[in-house]
Image (tube, rainbow, N blue to C red):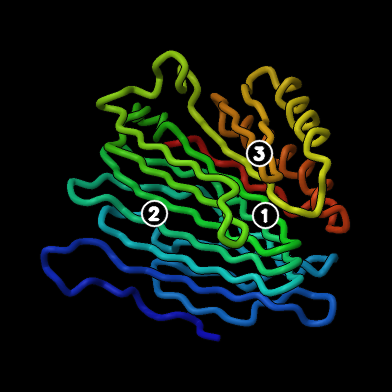
Amino acid sequence: MSNGSAANCCLRPERVGRDGSLSLRFGRRASNTVMTGCRFELPLQVLAPIQQPDGSAYVLLLNPTGGVLGGDRLSTLIDLGPDTHACLSTPSATRVYRTAGPAAILDTRIRVGPGAVLEYVPDLVIPHGGSALNQKLAIELQPGSVALFADGLAAGRLAHGERWSFREMVSHTVVTRGAKPLFIDRFFLRPLQIHPGRLNLMEDYNYLFTFGVFTDRTTEWEELRKRVDSIFSACPHVRGGAHLLASGGIISRFLGQSAIEVRDTLQEVWQTARKVVCPSGIAEYPRLAVAAPAN
């Protein structure tokens, strides 16, 4: 296990940004999930796992530099061994700073071993005016495994008048079980060319969240979909819906004008889903930090 190393800066003068990496492995010891491997290069870092009463590990991933710069290439590789249970989150939003050059690249790959449970719930991405980001999330499931993930995007630093003023945002999410794709999602935003506030896109909403649930352990998908939809119906300031996937799973998307409203809705959807797919887990993880106004 390594405590990490200094930032790996590119030596080519024509290249800007840093090459950061994070590699984590989780294994099972008795009834507990423990971190069996850890190596990182700044600007990526990880805090020590917090052992939960049910034996799962709660881990915070962070970037101590405070944000992502144009040209950064940050790669995260996480491996959950058989029958492990890890919840991965972040202590704050990911801020993407203005750049006149290349986009920042965030590449996260997670392997979920047989019988393992992954809960990947990072905070929002807040793109600053003039920023550019290309992010990819790939989750590979094995038989009997469970994955819950969240992906959130803010319209920008609203208090600075930077609503939809970033240069571009590319997001690519892939969930597979073995070689079989369960969910593929890709969007490409260039607000200066096609404004997301148009009718039938984001309109006057400022925050977008996607939440996915995947497992072959349950068949109660229709009941879970109804319960998630009822959460959206009870939130007058949040618009969303849940949809069944052909291969077993649910994807829900919801929009909101307030960071607090979408955070609270995400928390409720998350806890509702985990009671179905991992009912033996603890009642609730530490609540997500209230995302500060996008300023």
Residue type for callout 2: Gly
Q: Residue at x 53, y 41 (%)?
A: 152
Q: Nearer the viewer, residue 179 or 215?
A: 179
- Which residue is disc 2 drawn over? 67
Mark 3 vs mark 1, CA separation in Å: 14 Å
Q: Which mark is residue 221?
A: none
Q: In x, y percent, where is residue 37?
A: 58, 81
Q: Which residue is mark 3?
A: 245
User: Label 2 vs label 1: CA separation?
Assistant: 27 Å
Residue 278 left/right relative to 159: right
Q: Which structural element holds mark 3?
A: loop
Q: Position of residue 214 (x, y in %)?
A: 69, 49
Label 2: how many Cα within 10 Å (few below 14, some 14–19, many 20+): some
Question: Looking at the picture, how far across and down is residue 271, in whole percent?
Answer: 77, 44
The local secondary structure at tag 1 comes to strand
Q: Quadrant of residue 262?
A: top right
Task: Classify 88 as above or below 237.
Answer: below
- At a point 25% along the width and 62% down the height, the residue shown is 17
| Quadrant holding the N terminus | bottom right
Q: Please state which of the two labelled residues, at mark 2 or mark 3, is closer to the viewer.
A: 3
Mark 2 or 1: in front is 1
Please state, as top left, top right, bottom left or bottom right, where the C terminus lies in the image: top left
Q: Which residue sits furthest left? A: 14
Is 50 drawn above or below residue 167 in the view shown? below
Q: Is residue 9 left or right of residue 117?
A: left
Question: Seen in the image, is 150 located left or right of residue 5?
Answer: right
The amino acid beneath tag 1 is Ala
